[in-house]
Image: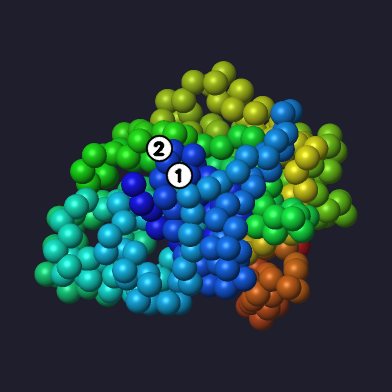
């Protein structure tokens, strides 16, 4: 089996690419980093350093790489592969969609009628469905119908902390990851037979797991980053070691968890145990996870379907407490980082138009009482 994976960054190499390779899939990475591409093609392997109670290095083999700017090379891959995955970041999906549209048309025109499944492994809700929409914007109705016959667009939820790590000069593309990983896919969306990939879990209720991860890991991670930044520490593990921060992170995850319990019928004790597992992951002493890395791109993180507003909207829907989530929104609005274009844009907008206008523009919130709370706390 052959797969094309878009994005040879830390998540691509340390998580999805590794799971595919471990299952005997030949993986071709597509990326714009030519140095990395050359290293993959030259070494034909790289190490994944798994850090935790039993740290070890595992090798990833059966790999090659192409430059994603090389349109002809990408199209040739898409015409023949069995599976396509991405780990490029939500913002990049829209940029690569026109190329994917062209490549999928080329596949159809080549006469290849074998099923092809595309899985966007991104930190977003229904990322593949979003990607499909962007691709289809570049296709005629007739082309869309032809693509639909053989191409499955499979949504997924991914969870693994993969922070930047010190360069290993003997293996410059080695990547460091935590021991925990979770890749859950919607089994109802595949075309043809579902590939047998070790570590890929199948479900017919994906949104429950997408939101569990988003409302717990992502929400808690972000709150921990903002509180850590306010406390002057660099790493997530340092932040979560501060009792006051740990308590606030846990309280926020309990607020968002109450939405999950109401919406999906999650067992309260099981979800409490899941929260404890997340807190333990944040405290992993072997992971250097920078608070600015986790806190970056506040505009994306304040969007209606992301880790602050989506659970907050859920609390409004079910009439549940939300003071900690409101405080998270305030901290996102207050996040300052001159090297982060979104943080700069957000602070400039607030300076020019005020906090209430920023809340309405970036979050989509309409509840005036909540907006007033945010404004009051911000000031």
Q: Residue furthest top?
A: 269
Q: Is residue 337 left or right of residue 355?
A: right
Nearest the viewer among 157 and 62 is 62
Question: Which image quadrant: the C terminus?
Answer: bottom right
- What residue lies at 28% left-to-right and 74% top-to-bottom? 102
At 11% from the left and 69% from the top, the residue drawn is: 142
Task: Tell me residue 127's x, y (percent).
Answer: 41, 55
Residue found farthest to the right: 232
Residue shown at the point (75%, 74%) measured from the top left: 338
In percent of width and height, residue 175 lies at: 66, 51
Q: Label for residue 197?
A: 2
Nearer-the-camera pick, 136 or 327: 136
Report if the CB atoms under discs 2 and 1 are less than 8 Å apart: yes
- 39 w.r.t. 285: above or below: below
Q: Nearer the viewer, residue 317 or 92?
A: 92
Measure the alpha-carbon separation of dots 2 and 1: 6 Å
Q: Could one spot residue 13 in this view of the protein? A: yes
Element assignment for label 1: helix
Disc number for residue 275? none
Q: Residues within 10 Å of mark 1 (few under 14, many from 20)?
A: many
Is 359 on the left-hand or right-hand side of 285? Answer: left
- In this rendering, position of residue 279 left or right of residue 200: right
Residue in the picture at 48% in, 59% down: 64
Name the spot of residue 153 as percent of width and height, x first. Answer: 30, 53
Give SS at disc 2.
Answer: loop
* Residue 346 visible in the picture: no
Question: Quadrant of the rendered structure where residue 193 is?
Answer: top left
Check the image and name the residue furthest to the bottom: 352
**Residue 30 position in % (x across, y down):** 47, 65
Identify residue for label 1. Answer: 20
């Amino acid at each position: 089996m052959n797969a094309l994976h878009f994005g040879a960054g830390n998540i691509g190499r340390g998580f999805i690419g590794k799971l595919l390779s471990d299952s005997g899939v030949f993986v071709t990475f597509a990326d714009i980093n030519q140095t990395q591409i050359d290293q993959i093609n030259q070494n034909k392997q790289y190490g994944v350093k798994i850090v935790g109670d039993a740290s070890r290095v595992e090798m990833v083999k059966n790999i090659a790489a192409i430059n994603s700017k090389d349109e002809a090379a990408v199209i040739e891959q898409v015409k023949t592969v069995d599976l396509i995955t991405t780990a490029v970041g939500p913002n990049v999906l829209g940029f690569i969609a026109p190329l994917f549209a062209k490549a999928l048309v080329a596949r159809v025109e080549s006469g290849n009628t074998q099923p092809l499944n595309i899985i966007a492994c991104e930190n977003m809700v229904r990322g593949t469905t979003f990607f499909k929409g962007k691709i289809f914007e570049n296709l005629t109705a007739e082309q869309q119908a032809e693509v639909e016959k053989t191409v499955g667009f499979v949504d997924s939820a991914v969870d693994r902390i993969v922070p930047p790590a010190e360069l290993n000069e003997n293996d410059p593309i080695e990547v460091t990851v935590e021991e925990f990983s979770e890749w859950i896919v919607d089994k109802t969306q595949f075309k043809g037979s579902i590939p047998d990939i070790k570590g890929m879990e199948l479900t017919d209720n994906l949104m429950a797991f997408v939101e569990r991860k988003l409302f717990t890991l992502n929400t808690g991670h972000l709150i921990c980053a903002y509180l850590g930044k306010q406390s002057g520490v660099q790493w997530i593990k340092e932040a979560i070691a501060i009792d006051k921060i740990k308590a606030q992170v846990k309280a926020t995850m309990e607020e968002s968890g109450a939405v999950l319990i109401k919406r999906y019928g999650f067992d309260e004790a099981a979800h409490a145990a899941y929260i404890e597992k997340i807190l333990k992951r944040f405290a992993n002493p072997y992971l250097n996870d920078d608070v600015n890395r986790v806190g970056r791109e506040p505009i994306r993180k304040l969007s209606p379907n992301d880790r602050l507003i989506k659970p907050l909207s859920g609390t409004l829907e079910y009439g549940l407490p939300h003071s900690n989530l409101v405080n998270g929104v305030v901290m996102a609005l207050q996040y300052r980082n001159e090297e982060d274009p979104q943080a700069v844009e957000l602070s400039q907008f607030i300076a020019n138009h005020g906090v209430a206008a920023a809340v309405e523009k970036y979050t989509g919130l309409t509840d005036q009482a909540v907006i007033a709370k945010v404004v009051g706390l911000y000031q």
